[in-house]
Amino acid sequence: MSSSDQTPLYAAREPIFPKRISGRFRNLKWVIMAVTLGIYYVLPWLRWDRGPGMPDQAVLVDLANRRFFFFMIEIWPHEFYFVAGLLIMAGLGLFLFTSMAGRVWCGYTCPQTVWTDLFILVERWVEGDRNNRLRLWRQKWSLSKFKLRLIKWALWFLIALFTGGAWIFYFADAPTLLWNLLTGQAPAIAYITMLVLTATTFVFAGFAREQMCIYACPWPRIQAAMMDEDTITIAYREWRGEPRGKHRKAEDADTLGDCIDCMACVNVCPMGIDIRDGQQLECITCALCIDACDEMMDKVGKPRGLIGYMALKDEAAERAGAHPKRIWRHIFRPRTMLYFTLWSGIGIALIVALFLRSPIDVNVTPARDPLFVALSDGAIRNTYSVRLRNKQGEPRVFRLTVMADDPAVQSALAVSLEGQPGNTVAVPADSTLDQRLYIVAEPGSTPATTARSEIKLWVEDTSSTDRAGLETIFNGKGK
């Protein structure tokens, strides 16, 4: 077999030029695009007063000090479980919405979809609607074509540049970083990150649009496990539309379905598919085909809904002319309620943990080598490494005391700090201090002669009622 007779294993990409459409779902996508892009671009510039010496950026990922600020909330490295909880909620939320309404995330709020919509909008402004863009694509290169492409690419690049720039503003004070970027004083990593994000946005939203959804994103393959016959998704009612035909005045027009085969649903699809062929991996459930079909049904005097949201479970009822199940019965079912219960349970737990967390954090590590030191007067001393974290915006003085359930143990123990007078230590504002702590048991006392005594170390803020405790062990000589 000659090489010319072989079937290629890879089909070259056919560019897709979606047609402009108006309707309720297209308007909803415009609103969501404006809101999501507005939040993304504006959020780093919002200010929030946290007091002197603290960053005043409302949302900030402070990598240098290993903290995350979100308005009045401050997350420290040891509180990463909050971030993990939010990621779990995001995953469960994706399962929940997919089981209810298919790939609604992909069609409305996925960043790839949002920026692709924005790039297509720019493309339409510069080159015209679908037919004009198709003609321009097929034309040979000329000065006019080059000028239009250059304008479009320049606008795409500016959007991509703002996208990459907005991302790095979340990791440093936005006004300061902007000035440093413009004057060439910003760190090299800031420029590198911005250029990488600019390039990926430019390519993904401009040239690899539907390919990112089909080949790069794993969710089209996963969604099959999340959907069932009760899932509300976009479908073509072929029992009403078939047989399709354009000639409505022909002799056999009475035998035709409502579909006039106008291809409007295909022309507006950003994925370039025909929803009349059934459920497909490429469909992102953006519902633009519904707007296009409803518009055509209005023009030919047919009822809307030839293409619409429906559950496969309702197909038999609709074919028979009966009313389908109410939409709430598809949404509120055991599967979705389980997802919602897990999702809301994690959210409530995070909120409770957020409000119950102590403003003082303490970590105690007993010295292991040696376990104890016998002093010259017969007393027993244990050494501990204590890490004190002051989460306040001003310096605080902490007092360390030891408690025990057994009064004989507690009365025999004394606390002292290395290099500090008494049992108090000053911790700078919003910082962590490592301190060496000594606990000494009197000669011949219960903790001195017992192998292990359970104790609790308390850290108290001397300027407030805040305090935190941690259980540990005092090691004695034993018998």
Image (cartoon, helix red, strand yellow):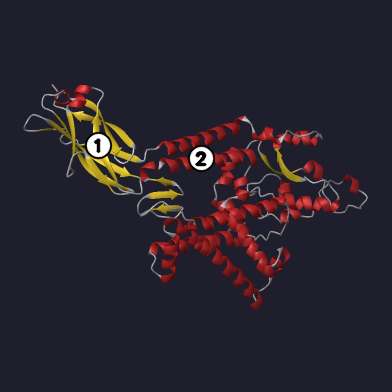
State which quarter of the image contains the C terminus: top left
Return the residue at label 2: 89
Q: Sequence-wise, which precedes: disc 1 or disc 2?
A: 2
363 and 5: which is toward the camera: 363
Q: Amino acid type of disc 2?
A: Met
- Residue at x 81% of width, y 42% of height: 240
State which quarter of the image contains the N terminus: bottom right
> Is the residue 310 above or below the residue 21 in the image?
above
Return the residue at label 1: 400
In the picture, the disc for residue 124 is: none
- Residue at x 29% of width, y 49% of height: 428
Where is residue 7 drawn, in percent x and y? 62, 56
Where is residue 427 drawn, in percent x and y? 27, 46
Number of numbered tags placed on the structure image: 2
Q: Amino acid type of disc 1?
A: Leu
SS state under label 2:
helix
> Is the residue 350 above or below the residue 282 in the image?
above
Where is residue 167 drawn, in percent x and y? 48, 58
Badge 1 vs badge 2, beta-carbon distance below 8 Å:
no
The answer to whether residue 2 shows anywhere in this view is no
The local crowd at label 2, few if under 14, some if 14 to 19, many if 20 or more residues have their Cα within 10 Å, is many
26 and 268: which is toward the camera: 26
